[in-house]
Amino acid sequence: MPSENDVLETKKKRFMVLNTIYDLAEQDEHQPISTYEIKNKTEIQGENLYLILKFLVKQGLIKNISTLESMYGGDAVISITHKGLCELENAIEKPDEPTENFPAHIYNSYTTIKGNNYGHNIAATMTESNIFDRRSGNHDEQIGDSYQQSGNFGIGHMSGGTIQSGAKVAGVINEAQQRNLAEAAAEIQQLLEQLEKSYPTNTTMGKMQIATEAISQIDSNPTLAGRILSALKAGGISAFEQLLNHPAASFVIGALEDWQETKKS
């Protein structure tokens, strides 16, 4: 029989997955989310992820766009429901109260799972410069009036360091790299806007086709490919994730990650 701690850990992971889907959906109930994206964000995969998604579907918090079984050997596609949006937001806004599917304080307690500390204290002190991305899964620790941090911030990268009270993060990415990153993202954005004339942006298949064709065109243009690879190396995939604004952006981000890996081999 599972212990009380086992049950709590399961609920934490369910909440983590729902929160990740919420972030990826950006409050859009019609936004398709692939299990590939969820695996990358949560590091939960295989049977564990399947069972969590199955539970969330059964409770009406998410819905299938493709069958969950298709995640074996490929990717399944889901979307958040109105009920899922409301339950997640209620858990955040009223942490002292339980929701239909989660106990009180679940939003606070689930962040203790390794690799998914969203650093709420830091986010609160850094709103002005909008540097902290709570989706990045980085580790943050408060020490008096300072914060020890590591991970991706904005479009830069910090490998480690201390942020004093009132200070602003200025990662090691320089001005030239920022400009190259912005230019590369703008070229991808322009490419996506051209491709949407040939493929629909309101279907999962259309978005996948846009992503596939975008990577194909990037790969066939050595100059553009080199510029994008350089920008990826400097700012990381999360930088493009924040700069791209297109219905197929999440699919393109996943495709860019795979493409970048093939270039390393």
Image: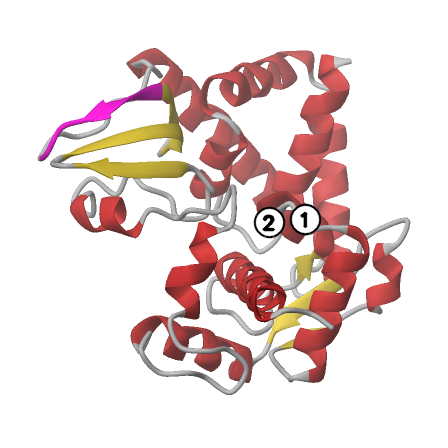
User: Residue furthest toward the bottom?
Assistant: 100
Query: What residue is drawn where x is 39% and y is 15%?
Result: 177
* Residue at the disc numbered 2: 42
Give the residue type that dot 1 points to.
Lys
Indicate yes or no whether the magenta region holds residue 161: yes
215 and 58: which is toward the camera: 58
Q: Secondary structure at mark 2?
A: helix
- Would you say the residues marked 1 and 2 are in contact, meaning their CB atoms lie under 8 Å apart? yes
34 and 188: which is toward the camera: 34
Q: Examine the rendered structure and indicate whether residue 42 appears above or below residue 156.
A: below
Confirm whether residue 4 shows in the render. yes
Give the residue type that dot 2 points to.
Thr
Quadrant where the N terminus sits is: bottom right
User: Residue furthest toward the right?
Assistant: 73
User: Residue furthest toward the left?
Assistant: 166
Confirm whether residue 203 shows in the render. no
* Residue at the disc numbered 1: 39
- Position of 187 with respect to 2 (left or right) is left
Query: What residue is drawn where x is 44% and y is 54%?
Result: 111
Indicate yes or no whether the magenta region holds residue 130: no
Disc 1 packing (10 Å; few <14; some 14–19; many ≥20): some
* Residue 217 tag number: none
- Position of 51 with respect to 74 (left or right) is left
Quadrant where the C terminus sits is: top right
Query: What residue is drawn where x is 86% and y is 50%?
Result: 74
Q: Which residues are magenta?
A: 160-165
Residue 193 in percent (x, y) is at 57, 46
- Position of 63 with respect to 108 (left or right) is right
